[in-house]
Image (tube, coloured by chain):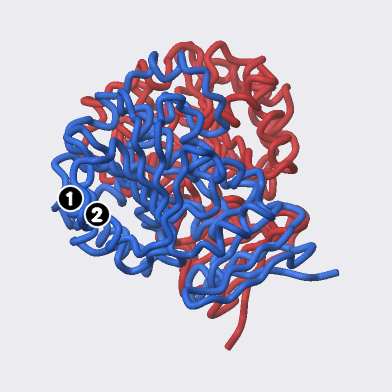
Chain colours: A red, B blue
Amino acid sequence: MDFWFTERHTEDVQLSIRLDKHIFSEENDNNRIDIFESPEYGKILTADGYIVMTEKDEFIYHEMMTHIPMAVHPNPQRILVFGAGDGGVVRELLKYPEVERIDMVEVNTGVVEAAKKYLPFSAGGLDDPKVTIHQQNALRYIRHIVGEYDVIIIDSAGYYGPGESLLSREFYGSCYKALKDDGIMVNQHQSPFYDEDRVETQNAHKRIVNSFPISRVYQAHIPSYPSGYWLFGFASKKYHPTDDLDAKRWNERGIITNYYTTNLHRGSFALPAYVERLLKRVE
Amino acid sequence: MDFWFTERHTEDVQLSIRLDKHIFSEENDNNRIDIFESPEYGKILTADGYIVMTEKDEFIYHEMMTHIPMAVHPNPQRILVFGAGDGGVVRELLKYPEVERIDMVEVNTGVVEAAKKYLPFSAGGLDDPKVTIHQQNALRYIRHIVGEYDVIIIDSAGYYGPGESLLSREFYGSCYKALKDDGIMVNQHQSPFYDEDRVETQNAHKRIVNSFPISRVYQAHIPSYPSGYWLFGFASKKYHPTDDLDAKRWNERGIITNYYTTNLHRGSFALPAYVERLLKRVE
Protein backbone atom coordinates (compact mmCIF):
# COMPACT_ATOMS: atom_id res chain seq x y z
CA MET A 1 0.00 0.00 0.00
CA ASP A 2 1.22 3.50 -0.78
CA PHE A 3 0.27 5.50 2.32
CA TRP A 4 2.50 8.52 3.00
CA PHE A 5 2.85 11.40 5.47
CA THR A 6 4.23 14.53 3.82
CA GLU A 7 5.52 17.64 5.54
CA ARG A 8 6.22 20.84 3.65
CA HIS A 9 9.57 22.18 4.86
CA THR A 10 9.11 25.23 2.64
CA GLU A 11 6.61 25.99 -0.13
CA ASP A 12 9.02 24.20 -2.46
CA VAL A 13 10.51 21.32 -0.47
CA GLN A 14 8.81 18.38 1.18
CA LEU A 15 9.79 15.26 3.10
CA SER A 16 7.59 12.18 2.81
CA ILE A 17 7.60 9.15 5.07
CA ARG A 18 5.76 5.94 4.25
CA LEU A 19 3.20 4.95 6.86
CA ASP A 20 1.83 1.67 8.10
CA LYS A 21 -0.98 2.92 10.32
CA HIS A 22 -2.68 5.99 11.72
CA ILE A 23 -2.97 5.08 15.38
CA PHE A 24 -4.17 8.24 17.12
CA SER A 25 -5.86 11.53 16.28
CA GLU A 26 -7.28 14.24 18.53
CA GLU A 27 -8.34 17.80 17.96
CA ASN A 28 -8.68 20.23 20.83
CA ASP A 29 -8.69 24.02 21.29
CA ASN A 30 -4.93 24.20 20.84
CA ASN A 31 -4.24 21.98 17.89
CA ARG A 32 -4.55 18.62 16.16
CA ILE A 33 -2.32 15.82 17.42
CA ASP A 34 -1.69 12.64 15.41
CA ILE A 35 0.41 9.55 15.92
CA PHE A 36 1.43 7.37 12.99
CA GLU A 37 3.33 4.12 12.71
CA SER A 38 5.97 3.98 9.93
CA PRO A 39 8.46 1.36 8.75
CA GLU A 40 11.51 3.69 8.63
CA TYR A 41 10.90 6.13 11.49
CA GLY A 42 8.78 3.97 13.82
CA LYS A 43 6.15 5.98 15.71
CA ILE A 44 5.70 9.57 14.53
CA LEU A 45 4.05 12.29 16.63
CA THR A 46 2.74 15.30 14.70
CA ALA A 47 1.05 18.54 15.73
CA ASP A 48 -1.02 20.35 13.11
CA GLY A 49 0.71 18.29 10.44
CA TYR A 50 4.27 19.05 11.58
CA ILE A 51 6.57 16.36 12.95
CA VAL A 52 7.15 16.85 16.68
CA MET A 53 9.24 13.71 17.05
CA THR A 54 9.85 10.28 15.61
CA GLU A 55 10.88 7.09 17.36
CA LYS A 56 13.98 6.78 15.15
CA ASP A 57 15.63 10.16 15.75
CA GLU A 58 14.05 11.61 18.92
CA PHE A 59 17.15 10.55 20.88
CA ILE A 60 19.16 13.23 19.10
CA TYR A 61 16.84 16.08 20.02
CA HIS A 62 16.13 14.95 23.58
CA GLU A 63 19.74 14.13 24.47
CA MET A 64 20.99 17.44 23.10
CA MET A 65 18.33 19.47 24.93
CA THR A 66 19.01 17.73 28.23
CA HIS A 67 22.62 16.61 28.62
CA ILE A 68 24.20 19.86 27.41
CA PRO A 69 22.87 21.93 30.38
CA MET A 70 22.96 18.99 32.81
CA ALA A 71 26.64 18.29 32.09
CA VAL A 72 27.60 21.93 32.67
CA HIS A 73 25.62 22.54 35.86
CA PRO A 74 27.50 21.01 38.84
CA ASN A 75 24.42 20.14 40.88
CA PRO A 76 21.11 20.39 38.98
CA GLN A 77 18.32 19.57 41.45
CA ARG A 78 15.26 21.60 40.46
CA ILE A 79 14.30 21.54 36.81
CA LEU A 80 11.55 23.34 34.90
CA VAL A 81 10.46 22.07 31.49
CA PHE A 82 8.09 23.82 29.07
CA GLY A 83 6.22 21.64 26.60
CA ALA A 84 7.88 18.25 26.43
CA GLY A 85 4.57 16.41 26.59
CA ASP A 86 6.08 13.45 24.75
CA GLY A 87 8.24 12.81 27.80
CA GLY A 88 11.63 12.57 26.05
CA VAL A 89 13.31 15.34 28.03
CA VAL A 90 11.96 13.97 31.32
CA ARG A 91 13.29 10.51 30.44
CA GLU A 92 16.79 11.96 30.01
CA LEU A 93 16.53 14.15 33.15
CA LEU A 94 15.65 11.14 35.29
CA LYS A 95 19.09 9.68 34.50
CA TYR A 96 20.51 12.21 37.03
CA PRO A 97 19.99 11.00 40.60
CA GLU A 98 20.48 14.48 42.09
CA VAL A 99 17.35 15.75 40.31
CA GLU A 100 14.81 16.23 43.08
CA ARG A 101 11.90 17.76 41.28
CA ILE A 102 10.83 18.31 37.67
CA ASP A 103 8.06 20.83 37.01
CA MET A 104 6.60 20.38 33.57
CA VAL A 105 4.36 23.11 32.14
CA GLU A 106 2.32 21.66 29.29
CA VAL A 107 -0.92 23.32 28.27
CA ASN A 108 -1.87 20.38 26.10
CA THR A 109 -2.30 17.43 28.44
CA GLY A 110 -3.85 15.49 25.57
CA VAL A 111 -0.31 15.01 24.26
CA VAL A 112 0.79 13.65 27.63
CA GLU A 113 -2.04 11.10 27.72
CA ALA A 114 -1.45 10.02 24.12
CA ALA A 115 2.31 9.75 24.69
CA LYS A 116 1.81 7.58 27.78
CA LYS A 117 -0.40 5.24 25.80
CA TYR A 118 1.34 5.11 22.41
CA LEU A 119 4.93 6.32 22.92
CA PRO A 120 6.19 4.38 25.96
CA PHE A 121 9.84 4.55 24.77
CA SER A 122 9.63 8.28 25.35
CA ALA A 123 6.89 8.84 27.96
CA GLY A 124 7.95 6.18 30.46
CA GLY A 125 9.09 8.70 33.07
CA LEU A 126 6.04 10.97 33.10
CA ASP A 127 4.51 9.08 36.03
CA ASP A 128 7.66 9.34 38.12
CA PRO A 129 6.98 10.86 41.58
CA LYS A 130 9.61 13.55 40.91
CA VAL A 131 7.50 14.90 38.04
CA THR A 132 4.67 17.42 38.47
CA ILE A 133 2.68 18.35 35.39
CA HIS A 134 1.16 21.86 35.39
CA GLN A 135 -1.54 22.31 32.77
CA GLN A 136 -1.08 26.03 32.37
CA ASN A 137 0.01 28.80 30.03
CA ALA A 138 3.80 29.11 30.12
CA LEU A 139 4.01 32.83 30.71
CA ARG A 140 1.37 32.77 33.41
CA TYR A 141 3.28 29.98 35.21
CA ILE A 142 6.70 31.59 35.11
CA ARG A 143 5.84 35.24 35.65
CA HIS A 144 5.92 35.27 39.46
CA ILE A 145 8.68 32.73 40.16
CA VAL A 146 12.00 34.03 41.48
CA GLY A 147 15.30 32.16 41.88
CA GLU A 148 13.85 28.70 42.05
CA TYR A 149 15.34 26.58 39.26
CA ASP A 150 18.77 25.26 38.37
CA VAL A 151 17.86 24.41 34.79
CA ILE A 152 15.00 25.47 32.50
CA ILE A 153 14.41 23.54 29.27
CA ILE A 154 12.07 25.09 26.71
CA ASP A 155 11.01 22.15 24.59
CA SER A 156 8.42 23.55 22.24
CA ALA A 157 8.45 24.32 18.56
CA GLY A 158 5.64 26.75 19.08
CA TYR A 159 3.59 24.23 17.14
CA TYR A 160 1.83 22.91 20.19
CA GLY A 161 1.76 23.73 23.85
CA PRO A 162 2.47 27.22 25.07
CA GLY A 163 3.18 28.53 21.58
CA GLU A 164 3.59 32.22 20.90
CA SER A 165 4.31 33.38 24.43
CA LEU A 166 7.49 31.29 24.42
CA LEU A 167 9.06 33.59 21.91
CA SER A 168 8.46 36.92 23.64
CA ARG A 169 11.11 38.97 25.40
CA GLU A 170 8.97 39.00 28.54
CA PHE A 171 9.02 35.23 28.61
CA TYR A 172 12.81 34.96 28.42
CA GLY A 173 13.16 37.72 31.01
CA SER A 174 10.85 35.78 33.34
CA CYS A 175 12.92 32.63 32.82
CA TYR A 176 16.01 34.59 33.82
CA LYS A 177 14.28 35.68 37.00
CA ALA A 178 13.04 32.16 37.77
CA LEU A 179 16.56 30.73 37.63
CA LYS A 180 18.94 30.60 40.59
CA ASP A 181 22.13 32.69 40.40
CA ASP A 182 23.95 29.95 38.53
CA GLY A 183 20.99 28.73 36.48
CA ILE A 184 21.01 27.60 32.84
CA MET A 185 18.26 27.82 30.22
CA VAL A 186 18.18 25.93 26.91
CA ASN A 187 15.69 26.40 24.10
CA GLN A 188 15.13 25.57 20.45
CA HIS A 189 16.62 27.94 17.92
CA GLN A 190 14.96 26.28 14.90
CA SER A 191 16.89 25.67 11.67
CA PRO A 192 18.97 28.39 10.04
CA PHE A 193 19.00 26.81 6.58
CA TYR A 194 15.78 27.88 4.83
CA ASP A 195 15.07 31.61 4.58
CA GLU A 196 11.67 31.37 6.25
CA ASP A 197 13.01 29.54 9.32
CA ARG A 198 16.11 31.72 9.64
CA VAL A 199 14.07 34.66 10.90
CA GLU A 200 12.88 32.58 13.86
CA THR A 201 16.47 31.61 14.65
CA GLN A 202 17.48 35.25 14.65
CA ASN A 203 14.47 36.39 16.71
CA ALA A 204 15.02 33.78 19.40
CA HIS A 205 18.71 34.59 19.56
CA LYS A 206 18.22 38.33 19.76
CA ARG A 207 15.79 38.10 22.66
CA ILE A 208 17.97 35.71 24.64
CA VAL A 209 21.15 37.73 24.09
CA ASN A 210 19.27 40.69 25.57
CA SER A 211 18.21 38.71 28.65
CA PHE A 212 21.29 36.64 29.60
CA PRO A 213 24.97 37.53 30.14
CA ILE A 214 26.13 34.25 28.53
CA SER A 215 24.37 33.09 25.40
CA ARG A 216 25.74 30.55 22.90
CA VAL A 217 24.17 28.50 20.12
CA TYR A 218 24.82 24.81 19.45
CA GLN A 219 23.79 22.39 16.74
CA ALA A 220 22.64 18.85 16.00
CA HIS A 221 21.57 16.78 12.98
CA ILE A 222 17.92 15.76 13.25
CA PRO A 223 16.94 14.04 9.98
CA SER A 224 13.15 14.32 10.40
CA TYR A 225 13.26 18.11 10.98
CA PRO A 226 13.35 20.69 8.16
CA SER A 227 16.77 20.58 6.46
CA GLY A 228 17.90 18.00 9.04
CA TYR A 229 19.87 20.72 10.77
CA TRP A 230 18.78 22.16 14.09
CA LEU A 231 20.04 24.81 16.49
CA PHE A 232 19.62 25.19 20.24
CA GLY A 233 20.35 28.09 22.55
CA PHE A 234 22.37 27.78 25.77
CA ALA A 235 21.78 30.81 28.02
CA SER A 236 23.31 31.13 31.43
CA LYS A 237 23.89 33.46 34.36
CA LYS A 238 27.29 32.07 35.29
CA TYR A 239 28.51 28.93 33.54
CA HIS A 240 30.13 28.88 30.12
CA PRO A 241 28.84 25.98 27.99
CA THR A 242 32.28 24.55 27.11
CA ASP A 243 34.79 26.15 29.52
CA ASP A 244 32.69 24.98 32.47
CA LEU A 245 32.04 21.50 31.15
CA ASP A 246 33.66 18.98 33.47
CA ALA A 247 33.95 16.07 31.06
CA LYS A 248 35.50 13.74 33.59
CA ARG A 249 32.67 14.32 36.07
CA TRP A 250 30.01 13.61 33.43
CA ASN A 251 31.73 10.53 32.05
CA GLU A 252 32.07 9.04 35.53
CA ARG A 253 28.30 9.10 35.85
CA GLY A 254 28.09 6.20 33.39
CA ILE A 255 24.98 7.55 31.63
CA ILE A 256 24.34 5.66 28.38
CA THR A 257 23.61 7.90 25.37
CA ASN A 258 23.27 7.36 21.64
CA TYR A 259 24.12 10.88 20.47
CA TYR A 260 25.62 12.96 23.29
CA THR A 261 29.25 12.62 24.28
CA THR A 262 31.38 15.20 26.09
CA ASN A 263 33.51 15.53 22.92
CA LEU A 264 30.42 16.15 20.84
CA HIS A 265 29.27 18.65 23.49
CA ARG A 266 32.33 20.81 22.76
CA GLY A 267 32.09 20.26 19.00
CA SER A 268 28.42 21.18 18.83
CA PHE A 269 29.19 24.81 19.72
CA ALA A 270 31.46 25.18 16.65
CA LEU A 271 29.07 26.56 14.06
CA PRO A 272 29.30 26.99 10.29
CA ALA A 273 30.49 30.40 9.06
CA TYR A 274 27.08 31.30 7.60
CA VAL A 275 25.37 30.59 10.93
CA GLU A 276 27.94 32.58 12.90
CA ARG A 277 27.27 35.50 10.58
CA LEU A 278 23.50 35.41 10.84
CA LEU A 279 23.66 35.21 14.65
CA LYS A 280 26.19 38.04 14.82
CA ARG A 281 23.84 40.26 12.85
CA VAL A 282 21.38 40.32 15.78
CA GLU A 283 23.84 40.33 18.70
CA MET B 1 2.57 24.47 -11.92
CA ASP B 2 3.25 21.44 -9.73
CA PHE B 3 6.50 20.02 -11.12
CA TRP B 4 8.64 18.11 -8.62
CA PHE B 5 11.88 16.16 -8.43
CA THR B 6 11.72 13.31 -5.92
CA GLU B 7 14.59 11.27 -4.56
CA ARG B 8 14.03 8.10 -2.57
CA HIS B 9 16.36 8.20 0.42
CA THR B 10 15.18 4.76 1.44
CA GLU B 11 12.29 2.60 0.24
CA ASP B 12 10.15 4.47 2.76
CA VAL B 13 11.45 8.06 2.82
CA GLN B 14 11.61 10.60 0.03
CA LEU B 15 12.64 14.23 -0.40
CA SER B 16 10.86 16.29 -3.05
CA ILE B 17 11.96 19.62 -4.48
CA ARG B 18 9.73 21.80 -6.64
CA LEU B 19 11.20 22.51 -10.05
CA ASP B 20 10.96 25.40 -12.49
CA LYS B 21 12.70 23.86 -15.49
CA HIS B 22 14.54 20.82 -16.76
CA ILE B 23 17.52 22.43 -18.46
CA PHE B 24 19.84 19.55 -19.38
CA SER B 25 19.70 15.80 -19.90
CA GLU B 26 22.26 13.38 -21.29
CA GLU B 27 22.60 9.65 -21.26
CA ASN B 28 25.92 7.96 -21.93
CA ASP B 29 27.54 4.58 -21.21
CA ASN B 30 28.13 5.51 -17.60
CA ASN B 31 24.89 7.09 -16.51
CA ARG B 32 22.17 9.66 -17.01
CA ILE B 33 22.97 13.25 -16.04
CA ASP B 34 20.26 15.89 -15.55
CA ILE B 35 20.27 19.52 -14.51
CA PHE B 36 17.15 21.18 -13.11
CA GLU B 37 16.33 24.68 -12.02
CA SER B 38 14.39 25.02 -8.75
CA PRO B 39 13.09 27.93 -6.68
CA GLU B 40 14.46 26.73 -3.31
CA TYR B 41 17.70 24.95 -4.23
CA GLY B 42 18.64 26.80 -7.42
CA LYS B 43 20.35 24.56 -9.99
CA ILE B 44 20.30 20.86 -9.19
CA LEU B 45 22.68 18.31 -10.76
CA THR B 46 21.53 14.69 -10.64
CA ALA B 47 23.11 11.42 -11.78
CA ASP B 48 20.78 8.49 -12.39
CA GLY B 49 18.10 10.30 -10.42
CA TYR B 50 20.25 11.00 -7.34
CA ILE B 51 21.22 14.52 -6.31
CA VAL B 52 24.93 15.12 -6.87
CA MET B 53 24.79 18.77 -5.80
CA THR B 54 22.53 21.77 -5.58
CA GLU B 55 23.39 25.44 -5.93
CA LYS B 56 22.03 26.17 -2.44
CA ASP B 57 24.04 23.72 -0.37
CA GLU B 58 27.02 22.64 -2.49
CA PHE B 59 29.23 25.05 -0.53
CA ILE B 60 28.95 22.80 2.52
CA TYR B 61 30.12 19.67 0.76
CA HIS B 62 32.85 21.31 -1.32
CA GLU B 63 34.29 23.40 1.52
CA MET B 64 34.40 20.44 3.89
CA MET B 65 36.07 18.16 1.31
CA THR B 66 38.70 20.75 0.46
CA HIS B 67 39.59 23.00 3.39
CA ILE B 68 39.91 20.23 5.97
CA PRO B 69 42.95 18.60 4.27
CA MET B 70 44.27 21.91 2.90
CA ALA B 71 44.29 23.53 6.35
CA VAL B 72 46.20 20.62 7.88
CA HIS B 73 48.85 20.19 5.16
CA PRO B 74 51.56 22.86 5.57
CA ASN B 75 52.39 23.17 1.87
CA PRO B 76 49.92 21.47 -0.49
CA GLN B 77 51.23 21.91 -4.04
CA ARG B 78 50.21 18.86 -6.05
CA ILE B 79 46.63 17.75 -5.77
CA LEU B 80 44.77 14.79 -7.24
CA VAL B 81 40.98 14.82 -7.43
CA PHE B 82 38.73 11.89 -8.41
CA GLY B 83 35.33 12.72 -9.85
CA ALA B 84 34.51 16.35 -9.04
CA GLY B 85 33.26 17.02 -12.56
CA ASP B 86 31.01 19.81 -11.27
CA GLY B 87 34.12 21.80 -10.42
CA GLY B 88 33.26 22.68 -6.81
CA VAL B 89 36.36 21.10 -5.25
CA VAL B 90 38.62 22.70 -7.88
CA ARG B 91 37.05 26.11 -7.18
CA GLU B 92 37.98 25.77 -3.49
CA LEU B 93 41.49 24.41 -4.24
CA LEU B 94 42.28 27.41 -6.43
CA LYS B 95 41.95 29.66 -3.36
CA TYR B 96 45.39 28.35 -2.29
CA PRO B 97 48.15 30.13 -4.22
CA GLU B 98 50.73 27.43 -3.45
CA VAL B 99 48.75 24.86 -5.43
CA GLU B 100 50.82 24.26 -8.55
CA ARG B 101 48.93 21.51 -10.28
CA ILE B 102 45.54 19.84 -9.97
CA ASP B 103 45.06 16.51 -11.72
CA MET B 104 41.40 15.65 -12.04
CA VAL B 105 40.41 12.10 -13.00
CA GLU B 106 36.84 12.12 -14.27
CA VAL B 107 35.64 9.33 -16.52
CA ASN B 108 32.47 11.23 -17.38
CA THR B 109 33.58 14.35 -19.21
CA GLY B 110 29.96 14.97 -20.17
CA VAL B 111 29.47 16.21 -16.59
CA VAL B 112 32.39 18.60 -17.01
CA GLU B 113 30.99 20.09 -20.20
CA ALA B 114 27.48 20.43 -18.76
CA ALA B 115 28.83 22.01 -15.57
CA LYS B 116 30.85 24.55 -17.53
CA LYS B 117 27.77 25.53 -19.45
CA TYR B 118 25.05 25.44 -16.77
CA LEU B 119 26.78 25.57 -13.37
CA PRO B 120 29.27 28.45 -13.67
CA PHE B 121 29.12 29.17 -9.89
CA SER B 122 30.77 25.81 -9.40
CA ALA B 123 32.66 25.04 -12.62
CA GLY B 124 34.39 28.39 -13.10
CA GLY B 125 37.85 27.04 -12.29
CA LEU B 126 37.85 24.01 -14.58
CA ASP B 127 39.57 25.93 -17.38
CA ASP B 128 42.35 27.19 -15.09
CA PRO B 129 45.83 26.38 -16.50
CA LYS B 130 46.71 24.60 -13.24
CA VAL B 131 43.98 22.01 -13.93
CA THR B 132 44.49 18.90 -16.08
CA ILE B 133 41.47 16.70 -16.67
CA HIS B 134 42.20 13.01 -17.28
CA GLN B 135 39.27 11.12 -18.79
CA GLN B 136 40.22 7.75 -17.38
CA ASN B 137 39.23 5.00 -14.99
CA ALA B 138 40.33 5.95 -11.48
CA LEU B 139 42.08 2.72 -10.59
CA ARG B 140 43.90 2.58 -13.92
CA TYR B 141 45.12 6.14 -13.40
CA ILE B 142 46.37 5.72 -9.84
CA ARG B 143 47.82 2.21 -9.97
CA HIS B 144 51.32 3.11 -11.13
CA ILE B 145 51.86 6.47 -9.41
CA VAL B 146 54.31 6.63 -6.50
CA GLY B 147 54.92 9.49 -4.05
CA GLU B 148 53.61 12.26 -6.24
CA TYR B 149 50.71 14.02 -4.44
CA ASP B 150 50.33 16.12 -1.30
CA VAL B 151 46.56 15.76 -1.17
CA ILE B 152 44.09 13.35 -2.80
CA ILE B 153 40.37 14.19 -2.75
CA ILE B 154 37.94 11.43 -3.71
CA ASP B 155 34.81 13.31 -4.67
CA SER B 156 32.46 10.68 -5.95
CA ALA B 157 29.35 9.10 -4.56
CA GLY B 158 29.92 6.11 -6.77
CA TYR B 159 26.85 7.33 -8.61
CA TYR B 160 28.80 8.72 -11.50
CA GLY B 161 32.40 8.77 -12.57
CA PRO B 162 34.80 6.10 -11.44
CA GLY B 163 32.17 4.27 -9.44
CA GLU B 164 32.79 0.83 -7.97
CA SER B 165 36.57 0.81 -8.17
CA LEU B 166 36.68 3.74 -5.74
CA LEU B 167 35.48 1.53 -2.94
CA SER B 168 37.98 -1.32 -3.27
CA ARG B 169 40.89 -1.94 -0.93
CA GLU B 170 43.25 -1.93 -3.92
CA PHE B 171 42.14 1.58 -4.78
CA TYR B 172 42.82 2.99 -1.31
CA GLY B 173 46.16 1.16 -1.20
CA SER B 174 47.09 2.76 -4.52
CA CYS B 175 46.14 6.19 -3.17
CA TYR B 176 48.43 5.59 -0.21
CA LYS B 177 51.28 4.78 -2.59
CA ALA B 178 50.56 7.81 -4.78
CA LEU B 179 50.85 10.21 -1.83
CA LYS B 180 54.10 11.75 -0.64
CA ASP B 181 55.37 10.77 2.84
CA ASP B 182 53.23 13.45 4.48
CA GLY B 183 50.23 13.15 2.14
CA ILE B 184 46.55 13.36 3.08
CA MET B 185 43.54 11.69 1.46
CA VAL B 186 39.90 12.61 2.03
CA ASN B 187 36.86 10.76 0.76
CA GLN B 188 33.11 10.51 1.24
CA HIS B 189 31.90 8.19 3.97
CA GLN B 190 28.20 8.50 3.06
CA SER B 191 25.52 8.91 5.73
CA PRO B 192 25.39 6.68 8.81
CA PHE B 193 21.72 7.33 9.58
CA TYR B 194 19.67 4.94 7.46
CA ASP B 195 20.44 1.22 7.76
CA GLU B 196 21.06 0.73 4.06
CA ASP B 197 23.65 3.56 3.86
CA ARG B 198 25.38 2.61 7.09
CA VAL B 199 26.97 -0.46 5.50
CA GLU B 200 28.73 1.78 2.97
CA THR B 201 30.03 3.99 5.77
CA GLN B 202 31.43 0.96 7.54
CA ASN B 203 32.94 -0.57 4.37
CA ALA B 204 34.71 2.65 3.39
CA HIS B 205 36.02 3.12 6.91
CA LYS B 206 37.26 -0.45 7.26
CA ARG B 207 39.26 -0.32 4.03
CA ILE B 208 40.85 3.04 4.85
CA VAL B 209 41.76 2.05 8.40
CA ASN B 210 43.59 -0.93 6.88
CA SER B 211 45.53 1.27 4.44
CA PHE B 212 46.52 4.38 6.47
CA PRO B 213 48.20 4.85 9.88
CA ILE B 214 45.96 7.85 10.70
CA SER B 215 42.29 7.63 9.86
CA ARG B 216 39.52 9.80 11.34
CA VAL B 217 35.94 10.56 10.32
CA TYR B 218 34.33 14.00 10.27
CA GLN B 219 30.81 15.28 9.65
CA ALA B 220 28.75 18.01 8.01
CA HIS B 221 25.07 18.85 7.54
CA ILE B 222 24.08 18.71 3.87
CA PRO B 223 20.31 19.22 3.64
CA SER B 224 19.85 17.88 0.08
CA TYR B 225 21.61 14.55 0.87
CA PRO B 226 19.85 11.55 2.46
CA SER B 227 19.10 12.35 6.13
CA GLY B 228 20.95 15.67 5.74
CA TYR B 229 23.85 14.18 7.63
CA TRP B 230 27.08 13.27 5.88
CA LEU B 231 30.43 11.81 6.85
CA PHE B 232 33.89 12.20 5.34
CA GLY B 233 37.11 10.29 5.92
CA PHE B 234 40.46 11.97 6.66
CA ALA B 235 43.33 9.53 6.08
CA SER B 236 46.94 10.50 6.45
CA LYS B 237 50.51 9.21 6.58
CA LYS B 238 51.76 11.79 9.08
CA TYR B 239 49.45 14.66 10.04
CA HIS B 240 46.68 14.42 12.62
CA PRO B 241 43.50 16.19 11.45
CA THR B 242 43.08 18.38 14.56
CA ASP B 243 46.41 18.24 16.45
CA ASP B 244 48.24 19.34 13.31
CA LEU B 245 45.76 22.04 12.34
CA ASP B 246 47.50 25.42 12.48
CA ALA B 247 44.44 27.62 12.85
CA LYS B 248 46.42 30.86 12.92
CA ARG B 249 48.16 30.00 9.65
CA TRP B 250 44.89 29.21 7.91
CA ASN B 251 43.05 32.26 9.23
CA GLU B 252 45.86 34.54 8.06
CA ARG B 253 45.23 33.38 4.51
CA GLY B 254 42.02 35.41 4.45
CA ILE B 255 40.07 32.78 2.49
CA ILE B 256 36.33 33.55 2.51
CA THR B 257 34.10 30.57 3.32
CA ASN B 258 30.43 30.07 4.10
CA TYR B 259 30.68 26.85 6.07
CA TYR B 260 34.28 26.05 7.00
CA THR B 261 35.98 27.74 9.95
CA THR B 262 38.97 26.45 11.92
CA ASN B 263 36.69 26.08 14.97
CA LEU B 264 34.22 24.06 12.95
CA HIS B 265 37.16 22.01 11.62
CA ARG B 266 37.92 20.82 15.16
CA GLY B 267 34.25 20.39 16.02
CA SER B 268 33.49 18.34 12.92
CA PHE B 269 35.64 15.44 14.20
CA ALA B 270 33.50 15.12 17.36
CA LEU B 271 30.98 12.46 16.32
CA PRO B 272 27.70 11.28 17.87
CA ALA B 273 27.93 8.24 20.14
CA TYR B 274 26.04 5.99 17.70
CA VAL B 275 28.46 6.88 14.88
CA GLU B 276 31.53 6.31 17.07
CA ARG B 277 30.17 2.87 17.89
CA LEU B 278 29.45 1.83 14.33
CA LEU B 279 32.92 2.94 13.19
CA LYS B 280 34.60 1.19 16.12
CA ARG B 281 32.92 -2.06 15.13
CA VAL B 282 35.03 -2.22 11.93
CA GLU B 283 38.32 -0.78 13.24
Q: Which chain carries label 1?
A: B
- Image position of A106 (left or right of A239): right
Residue at the image position 42 percent from the left and 28 percent from the top: A69
Name the residue nearer the viewer: A71 or A111: A71
Name the residue nearer the viewer: A33 or B282: B282
Q: Are marks 1 and 2 in contact (CB under 8 Å)?
A: yes
Q: Position of residue B61 (x, y in %)?
A: 49, 45
Q: In this view, does B137 lie above or below B60?
A: below
**Quarter of the rendering occupied by the C terminus of chain A:** top right
- Residue furthest to the bottom: A1
Q: Where is residue A125 in the image (x, y as percent from the top left)?
A: 40, 50
- Image position of B226 (left or right of B72): right
- Image position of A62 (left or right of B141): right
Q: In the picture, residue A49 is in which quadrant?
A: bottom right
Q: Which numbered circle lies on residue B209?
A: 1
Q: Which amino acid does label 1 sit on?
A: Val
Residue A3: tell me if it is visible: yes
**Quarter of the rendering occupied by the N terminus of chain A:** bottom right
Q: What element carries label 1?
A: helix
Q: Position of residue B156 (x, y in %)?
A: 42, 57
What crowding class fits label 1: few (fewer than 14 Cα within 10 Å), some (14-19), or many (20 or more)? some
Q: What element carries label 2?
A: helix
Q: Which numbered circle lies on residue A56?
A: none
Q: Mark 2 points at which residue?
A: B205
Q: Are marks 1 and 2 on the same chain?
A: yes
Q: Which amino acid does label 2 sit on?
A: His
